Amino acid sequence: MKILISALLAMTFLATPASAATVRQITGFGSNPGALRMYEYIPDGLAPGRPVVVALHGCTQDATYGQNAGWIDLADRLRFTVVLPQQVTANNFSQCFNWFQSLDIRRGSGEAESIAQMARRGVADAGADPRRVYVTGLSAGGAMTSVILAAYPDLFAGGGVVAGLPYGCAATVIEAYTCMNPGKDLTPRQWGDKVRAASTFSGARPGVNVWHGGADYTVASANMRELSEQWTDVGAPVQTRLITGMGHGQPVAPGQGCGRAGAYMLDVGVCAAAELSRAWGL
């Protein structure tokens, strides 16, 4: 009888799923002037003092970008929080972050301020280290990463721009398309002046990692050069990674357990999220 009871108890425990962390929507994180949605992932049992990564999706995407790019799995393995801002169609029909709209790229205003509020909330929710907050994004999310690094350099320790654009490249929709391809060629000083005008920050700039596909015809790879010139001119450490033959998208490596292949999630055997994690010491 004791053996039977033990067996039944064992089956009961095995059949009961363990509690697991999930990506959850967060409301009331601030005034949210950009009217964005916030999602957050905090691994179970996460110790205080760990980092936070803010991951910004591209056009036509949503907060599932965090899983598809590999950030959620990495958060479980490396122990950090992921904050996932999500655009809504009321702001942009294609769900692109508005990286070119003047009200959305200023400190204290619009979508940029909403994202900064989410970063602060992520730090508070996880008891995270405010000195180890990072931001990255793909395409429009990559361009918005440039915005966030320019407007809020005091909040972030580093950034990763994937298939993105320099800060201040465009002020209208038509100009945005020109910036995307063929790109805008300014001097390093001209690019740097745009960043310097975005805040009163005078400290050491967060480092910037720039990723781009050599066969990207949506956002021309010339933007990688312009991004490098912009951030180098303001004194930020810059690293670039051009992937030969890759089109427009996020480099993922499902075969290495990092990311999921799909639209704009490109299996090139290299995972940008994993490489950024290493560069940031996560």
Image (tube, helix red, strand yellow):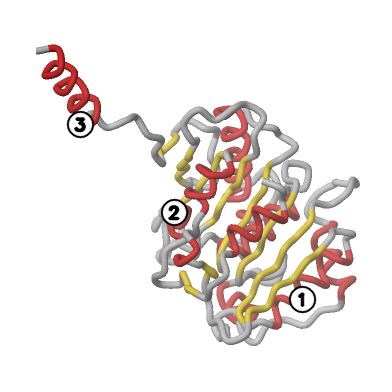
Q: Which residue is mark 1?
A: 226
The residue under the point 78% across, 54% down is 198
Q: Is residue 191 above or below residue 199?
A: below
Comes first in the chain, label 1 or label 2: 2
Q: Position of residue 272 (x, y in %)?
A: 60, 64
Look at the numbered discs 1 and 2 and tell me whether their residues touch, using CB distance below 8 Å.
no
Dividing the picture into quadrants, the one containing residue 145 is bottom right
Instruction: Choose mark 1 or mark 3, whichever is in front.
Output: 3
Q: Which residue is mark 2?
A: 67
Q: Position of residue 192 (x, y in %)?
A: 85, 65
Distance (Cα) linking label 1 and label 3 = 55 Å
Dividing the picture into quadrants, the one containing residue 175 is bottom right
Comes first in the chain, label 1 or label 3: 3
Q: Residue furthest top?
A: 2
Distance (Cα) linking label 3 and label 2 = 26 Å
Q: Amino acid at mark 3?
A: Ala
Q: Residue furthest left?
A: 1
Q: Which residue is mark 3?
A: 15
The residue under the point 47% across, 40% down is 41
Q: Amino acid at mark 2?
A: Gln
